Image (cartoon, rainbow, N blue to C red):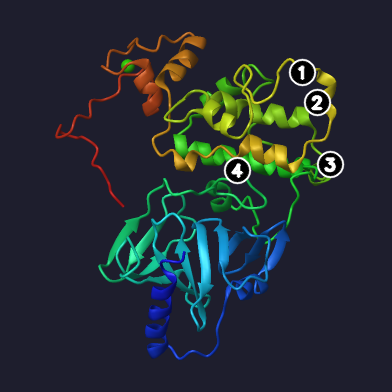
């Protein structure tokens, strides 16, 4: 930090020439403008979650861990904003003002990503997109920068936020019990996410739940009385089971490695012991367990796809050889399943340029 402080002061002076210094804000002011959530964590409407790392909220300068930006050293600018320096020397230094955030300024003399007025796209972590007003182009910050898409309520992936599963302004303890309504809402949303993300077919959900009680979807959401009851571990495991069958049959996503990073061992493909005494299933499920089971970070694994070998296993289970072509149209049963065509009726050829080929419509 010491090496940049004199230069920060110099630029702060430069800024003062163009932005009249009405007042000075330091890190303690940032803390005071935010709501204390839990432990060292704070939250405010414009900047989101951050954690102070020195247990000293009154410090005028110091480190914070920000939910999306990572480790930052925060100092005063001498006026209405803050200097925030990336402590891993990747993002450089940013000048941030509450009224204009997520627009921010990175002076060229410090920044390793070119000096510019940029616009940070909230929620674009871990890739973290910035729009450079100077060049009129987008830039992406390397995902390697330390980042965890969580907060005091974490771990939670961004698809939870993007699908409205999490109200970041509310405090919920991981030890709170889960209601049946919350469990159904999370499971239904997770299914909708996977349906869109993996182009899941309904038949694969049937297959995924076949060994663990049968496909529960669509869930009976309209049950106001029951929805306020406390969900138990058996219900949680049942609803999560099909998801883990799907997650363990993806290319491009290692479910076991992800669980291991969370401190959980998968036993027989499930993040719980299937041989555990059934009596334990009547214990209440808590919010932390719900988040853990449904917080698979697929939005960070863009290449993840359902394995064709798993689809083939499903086809075999219903007596349809995956590589056979009973209608002789040149498409195997596996290909027809993935295309959504009927494997018993020859699909018209649609090679590019063939007469009558369907046009590709781009919206
Ligand atoms: Ca065929």
Q: Are marks 2 and 1 in contact (CB under 8 Å)?
A: yes
Residue 220 appearing in the image: no
Q: Which residue is mark 2?
A: 281
Spatial separation of the CA atoms under disc 4 and disc 1: 28 Å
Q: Going 84% across and 41% down the picture, which residue do you hit?
A: 229
Q: Are marks 3 and 1 in contact (CB under 8 Å)?
A: no
Foreground: 299 or 119?
119
Vertical position of residue 278 compared to residue 254: above or below: above
Of the two numbered discs 4 and 2 in the rendering, the one whose residue sits closer to the viewer: 2
Residue 226 appearing in the image: yes
Foreground: 177 or 68?
68
Q: Going 34% across and 9% down the picture, which residue do you hit?
A: 324
Residue 312 percent across, percent down from the top left: 43, 15
Q: Residues within 10 Å of mark 1 (few under 14, many from 20)?
A: few
Residue 260 percent across, percent down from the top left: 58, 29
Of the two numbered discs 4 and 1 in the rendering, the one whose residue sits closer to the viewer: 1
Label 1 CB sits under 8 Å from any ligand 1 atom? no
Q: Which residue is mark 4?
A: 189
Q: Residues within 10 Å of mark 2 (few under 14, many from 20)?
A: some
| Quadrant of the rendered image holding ligand 1 | top left
Left or right: residue 131 versus residue 236 is left
Label 3 CB sits under 8 Å from any ligand 1 atom? no
Q: Secondary structure at mark 4?
A: helix
Q: Which residue is mark 1?
A: 276
Determine which of the numbered discs, if any, sits on residue 229 in the image. Answer: 3
């Amino acid at each position: 930090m010491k090496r940049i402080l004199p230069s920060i002061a110099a630029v702060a002076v430069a800024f003062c020439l163009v932005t009249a210094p009405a007042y000075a804000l330091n890190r303690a002011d940032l803390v005071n403008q935010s709501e204390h959530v839990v432990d060292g964590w704070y939250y405010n409407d414009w900047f989101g979650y951050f954690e102070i790392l020195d247990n000293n909220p009154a410090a005028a300068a110091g480190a914070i861990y920000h939910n999306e930006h990572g480790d930052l050293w925060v100092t005063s600018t001498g006026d209405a904003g803050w200097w925030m320096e990336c402590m891993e020397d990747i993002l450089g230094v940013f000048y941030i003002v509450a009224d204009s955030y997520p627009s921010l300024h990175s002076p060229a003399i410090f920044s390793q990503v070119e000096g510019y007025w940029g616009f940070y796209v909230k929620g674009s972590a871990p890739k973290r997109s910035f729009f450079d007003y100077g060049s009129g182009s987008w830039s992406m910050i390397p995902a390697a920068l330390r980042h965890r898409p969580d907060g005091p309520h974490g771990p939670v992936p961004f698809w939870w936020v993007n699908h409205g599963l999490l109200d970041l302004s509310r405090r919920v303890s991981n030890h709170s019990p889960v209601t049946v309504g919350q469990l159904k809402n999370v499971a239904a949303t997770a299914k909708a996410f996977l349906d869109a993300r993996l182009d899941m077919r309904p038949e694969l959900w049937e297959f995924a739940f076949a060994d663990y009680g049968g496909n529960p979807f669509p869930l009976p959401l309209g049950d106001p009385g029951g929805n306020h009851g406390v969900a138990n571990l058996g219900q949680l495991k049942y609803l999560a089971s099909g998801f883990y069958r799907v997650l363990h049959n993806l290319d491009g996503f290692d479910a076991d490695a992800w669980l291991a990073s969370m401190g959980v061992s998968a036993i027989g493909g499930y993040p719980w012991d299937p041989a555990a005494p059934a009596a334990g299933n009547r214990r209440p499920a808590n919010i932390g367990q719900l988040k853990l089971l449904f917080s698979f970070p697929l939005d960070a694994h863009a290449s993840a796809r359902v394995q064709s070998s798993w689809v083939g296993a499903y086809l075999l289970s219903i007596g349809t050889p995956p590589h056979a072509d009973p209608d002789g149209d040149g498409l195997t049963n596996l290909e027809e399943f993935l295309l959504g065509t009927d494997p018993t009726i020859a699909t018209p050829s649609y090679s590019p340029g063939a007469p009558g080929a369907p046009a590709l419509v781009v919206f």
